[in-house]
Image (cartoon, helix red, strand yellow):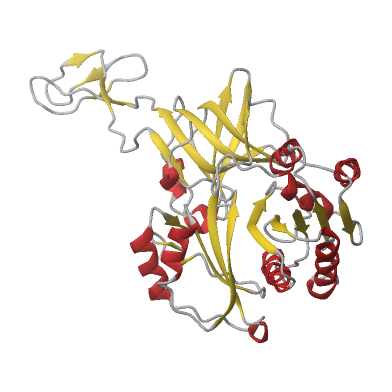
Amino acid sequence: MLIGIDDTDSPRGMCTTYLGAVLARNLIREHMRVREARLVRLNPNVTWKTRGNAAIMLEFEGDPERAFEITCNLVEELADQSCENTNPGVVVAEKKFDPAFYQKAVTNFCTVDEAVAILEAAGARYRGWKNRRGLIGATAAVASELADKTSEILVYREPERFGTPRHVSRESLFAAEAATFPHTWDTVDVVNDVVVCVPHTPDPVLFGIRGESPQWVMAARQMILSEHPGIEQIWVTNQGTDAHLLPGTTGHLQDLISYFVSGTVTSATETKVGGHVSFIMKDGDFAVRCMAYEPTKNFRHIVRQLVPGDRVIAVGSFKKGSINLEKLKIVSLEKVEKIRPPLCTACNKRMTSDGKGKGYKCKKCDARTEAPDVQVGNRTLAPGWYEVPSTARRHLAKPLCRGFPD
């Protein structure tokens, strides 16, 4: 049996994963066995998402009718339906749906009608609240098949602490990162000296540790000192897998879809107001702007070193005519030539220009030459993959510590 839930949170509080963790315990109290808890991130560019566009799925053994009743009652109790964008959906199914629906939901857009058609065809139990948009994510979670998967342990607060300042030892977070990286990631941003895994919103999450396996996230979690937690849940997830990315070509990119795109840099980089850095790249007849926004911090230093002629692969979401960079591969670097007046062979002094098209002249001995001194400049940039820091990384983006994209 499979339970899918989506869209129960809001910017003011609640968290769909917390509701799922509570539900798992409620099912166990009803003598049902929970075999897996899955956290599924969907298209991060969805404009109506409440926060991180996550849905959850519980695989369980037990009475589906009773499980459906328990789940709906819990949604009624915990979901923040006062928020306009919170539109919960619950699905209980006896078998998985076609994974093509999940693939579309994580890379593109689905409709409520598409979800309902799948649910009706499968004879699944389902309920949607308000505009029922949560049925999309709930259906996608049940349909999900994860070719690549990671783990996250989410530690939740005691309910009486919701909305109050969190107390998590900064030193223990940095120590956990140092001890378990690269098997865990995004606990902290070492380069920018920032804690990443502790949220700032008034939701139930105290902190979360992402990593390769339940064993590694638990190893890091046990090193962390904090206020007394409430419940904890290890989730199987598609986070850190690049599941949202599609191959794309310039001139054929769809708004709010995320891509790998190859091209050649055709313009010098520009730093705009606010510290955002951009460049233009082209593949064939079509050009596209690539953006590294201010929150990507030191990643912008890499982007600023690009010059026309460099071959790159840009990775990110396409929005309003620009690729918002998540990663960048430098395939090859253009040689940078520096033209200077030549040295006088007699005086060992730099000549000066004798006028446009007239060559160069030594001021000391009047020696002349036509040829300039052409030097190939040294570039500190090297081919390879570069990524935004942990503070700017999306949930689905695969960190380079997990390996390089094909």
Give the number of marks. Answer: 0
Decide: is 95 above or below 368. below
Residue at x 80% of width, y 63% of height: 67
Residue at x 31% of width, y 14% of height: 358
Residue at x 81% of width, y 42% of height: 110
Decide: is 175 above or below 101. below
Residue at x 47% of width, y 53% of height: 389
**Would you say residue 275 is visible in this rendering?**
no
User: Along the line of sight, which residue is nearer the eye, 317 or 275?
Assistant: 317
> In this rendering, would 294 be left or right of 45?
left
User: Along the line of sight, which residue is nearer the eye, 165 or 133?
Assistant: 133
Where residue 257 sits, quadrant-wise, is top right
**Would you say residue 50 is visible in this rendering?**
yes
Where residue 357 sits, quadrant-wise, is top left
> In this rendering, would 60 be left or right of 230?
right
- In percent of width and height, residue 200 lies at 60, 72
User: Along the line of sight, which residue is nearer the eye, 396 or 135?
Assistant: 135
- In percent of width and height, residue 7 lies at 78, 60
In the picture as drawn, the residue positioned furthest to the bottom comes out as 160
- In percent of width and height, residue 13 lies at 72, 73
- In percent of width and height, residue 388 lies at 48, 49
